[in-house]
Image (tube, rainbow, N blue to C red):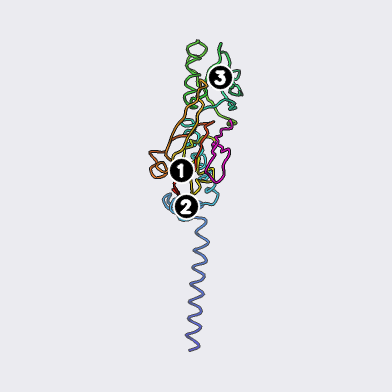
């Protein structure tokens, strides 16, 4: 019994020595490069990702999201008076301008004889207008213009009457507000709100336009919801016949 125990112990010692020698041989094989196939390295990388690589992937994803948001903003947001913008023309530092859109919606750009009215345009539309003006006046042949809204003008509406928080409601930058979202931002309708809503809007020519809408229909069917513009006044009267909401 004692002899078998000694033999077993010697066998275990030999096995341990062989494993230790094999572990010492592995680093030298990797260092040589040729002994380890490239596909194995890739598989090892995919099985155990390098923690240092994760922030780079996260940063790239975040950059892609920012680029997408900027592209979407350029298509949706409409420039307003008092917006502060930054304009550049590629390869011409003298054309770089930090400007505030005037109350009449115009800006004065480098080299152009007359101001351009850009309020009401999307960022992409304003860029197209500026590039066309430079070409038409033979200032640049193929100008590459960039435009960024640095500070957004305050946009707000008033919501009064039968809402839980009557008063001013700010329209978030780069967003379109509708009747339903405006009433929601004012705390929502009270229990005795009449579904017929009156919207008063001042047009560019100074005239007043009255718009009638049904809040209950707009809440039930988004296709019947209507966009609200900067400066609109929304009034919700009391329902004299009983509770609707």
Q: Which residues are magenta?
A: 153-172
Residue 210 magenta-drawn? Answer: no
Q: Number of numbered discs present?
A: 3
Residue under label 2? 45
Q: Secondary structure at mark 2?
A: helix
Label of residue 11 in the image: none
Q: Nearer the viewer, residue 33 or 43?
A: 43
Label of residue 106 in the image: 3
Alpha-carbon neighbours of circle 1 within 10 Å: few (<14), some, or many (≥20)? many
Residue 168 magenta-drawn? Answer: yes
Alpha-carbon neighbours of circle 3 within 10 Å: few (<14), some, or many (≥20)? some
Where on the picture, by quarter, is residue 102? Answer: top right
Label of residue 194 in the image: 1
Q: Nearer the viewer, residue 207 or 4?
A: 207
Residue 189, placed above or below residue 80: below
Q: Earlier in the sequence, mark 2 or mark 3?
A: 2
Q: Position of residue 44 (x, y in %)?
A: 46, 54
Label 1 – label 2 distance at C-alpha:
64 Å
Where on the picture, by quarter, is residue 159? Answer: top right
Residue at image position (50%, 29%) is 201
């Amino acid at each position: 019994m004692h002899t078998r125990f000694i033999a077993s112990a010697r066998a275990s010692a030999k096995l341990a020595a062989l494993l230790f020698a094999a572990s010492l041989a592995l680093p030298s094989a990797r260092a040589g490069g040729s002994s380890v196939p490239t596909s194995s390295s890739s598989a090892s990388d995919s099985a155990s990702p390098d923690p240092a690589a994760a922030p780079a992937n996260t940063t790239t994803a975040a950059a892609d999201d920012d680029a997408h948001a900027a592209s979407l903003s350029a298509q949706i947001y409409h420039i307003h008076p008092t917006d502060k913008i930054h304009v550049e023309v590629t390869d011409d530092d003298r054309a770089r301008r930090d400007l505030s859109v005037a109350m009449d919606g115009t800006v004065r750009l480098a080299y152009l004889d007359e101001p351009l009215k850009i309020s009401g345009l999307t960022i992409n539309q304003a860029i197209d207008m500026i590039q066309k003006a430079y070409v038409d006046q033979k200032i640049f042949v193929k100008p590459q213009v960039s435009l960024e809204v640095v500070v957004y003008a305050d946009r707000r509406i008033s919501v009064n009457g039968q809402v839980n928080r009557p008063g001013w409601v700010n329209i978030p930058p780069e967003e379109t507000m509708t009747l339903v979202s405006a009433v929601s931002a004012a705390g929502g309708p009270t229990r005795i709100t009449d579904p017929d809503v009156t919207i008063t809007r001042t047009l560019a020519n100074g005239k007043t336009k009255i718009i009638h809408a049904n809040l209950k229909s707009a809440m039930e069917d988004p296709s019947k919801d209507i966009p609200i513009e900067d400066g609109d006044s929304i009034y919700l009267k009391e329902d004299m016949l009983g509770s609707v909401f």
